[in-house]
Image: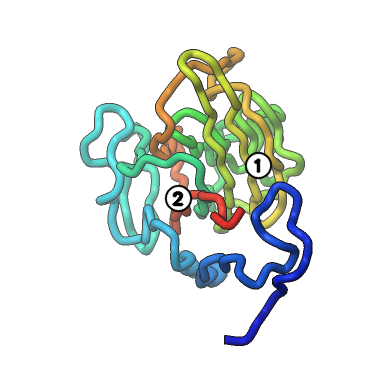
């Protein structure tokens, strides 16, 4: 095999590897996803864990008490059935990259928080707001892509109601030692390819109309989708567990 690097350069500070070290292990190869369109979702990357592929909800359960979820599945998407309750994955997620697509109802009804409302809860506790905020004002920390009740998004990147929209999320779970918080949860979020939060620290789990604080909880939890009474749709949901490239 041809030599690609060098074996006589200086060592990188704090590392066992030289600059441009020929022996340094290569990152693994991953086939990237194909792009989604309004007509159809794209494919997940080759190392992703698919949570919803448009066919069934076998990987999901009711958030309140478990059991089969009451949402409907058709035409490659799932849709909220009002009053059936939130649903959650059976899979438990910690630090991860998450991709999902959602669409607010094409027929506009209501305003502010009463228009195309749902939510994506990381670890079942930390909500990223889903809302139709296309020409629909609401309170800033309840805007689409907001860390609900905590932090508004940098911008409003909503598409018109009825169109498919994307969330791409980088999630780092909080760390606890006993009852002590060592590190808060942090999130980076892109909405339709536009950055809304960059490595933003959360103040604690999501609450409504009150402030929040951390309390110890497990290191992993489900992805939860909210039934807020509106006919919001979801499709093409997958995640990739995050682990550091092991060549330090």
x then y, percent, for residue 145: 63, 40
Q: Farthest residue toward the front?
A: 8
Outermost residue toward the right in this view = 10
121 lies left or right of 199: left
Residue 87 in view here:
yes
Which mark identifies residue 133?
1
Residue 21: where, in percent of width, then height?
68, 68
Residue named by callout 2: 233
Q: Nearer the viewer, residue 54 or 187?
A: 187
**Circle 2 SS class:** strand
Looking at the picture, does residue 189 appear above or below residue 166? above
Q: Residue at x 37, y 34 (%)?
A: 86
Give the residue displayed 57% in from the left and 15% down from the top.
213
Point 55% across, 58% down: residue: 164
* Above or below for 152 versus 2: above
Position of the N terminus by quadrant: bottom right
Way the structure is coloured = rainbow
């Amino acid at each position: 095999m041809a030599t690609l690097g060098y074996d006589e350069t200086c060592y990188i500070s704090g590392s066992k590897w030289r600059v441009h070290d020929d022996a340094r292990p290569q990152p693994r190869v991953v086939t990237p996803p194909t792009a989604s369109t309004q007509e159809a979702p794209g494919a997940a990357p080759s190392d992703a864990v698919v949570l919803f592929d448009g066919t069934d909800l076998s990987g999901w359960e009711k958030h309140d008490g478990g059991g089969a979820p009451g949402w409907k599945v058709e035409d490659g998407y799932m849709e909220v059935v009002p009053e059936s309750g939130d649903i959650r994955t059976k899979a438990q997620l910690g630090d991860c990259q998450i991709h999902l697509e959602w669409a607010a109802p094409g027929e506009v009804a209501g305003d502010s928080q009463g228009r195309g409302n749902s939510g994506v809860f990381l670890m079942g506790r930390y909500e990223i707001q889903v809302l139709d905020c296309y020409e629909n004002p609401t309170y800033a920390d309840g805007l689409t892509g907001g860390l609900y009740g905590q932090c508004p998004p940098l911008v409003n990147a909503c598409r018109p109601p009825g169109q498919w929209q994307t969330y791409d999320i980088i999630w780092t779970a909080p760390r606890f030692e006993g009852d002590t918080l060592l590190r808060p949860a942090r999130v980076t979020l892109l909405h339709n390819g536009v950055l809304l939060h960059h490595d933003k620290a959360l103040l604690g789990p999501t609450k409504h109309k009150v402030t929040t604080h951390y309390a110890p909880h497990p290191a992993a939890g489900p992805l939860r989708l909210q039934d807020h009474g509106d006919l919001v749709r979801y499709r093409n949901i997958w995640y990739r567990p995050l682990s550091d490239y092991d060549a330090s």
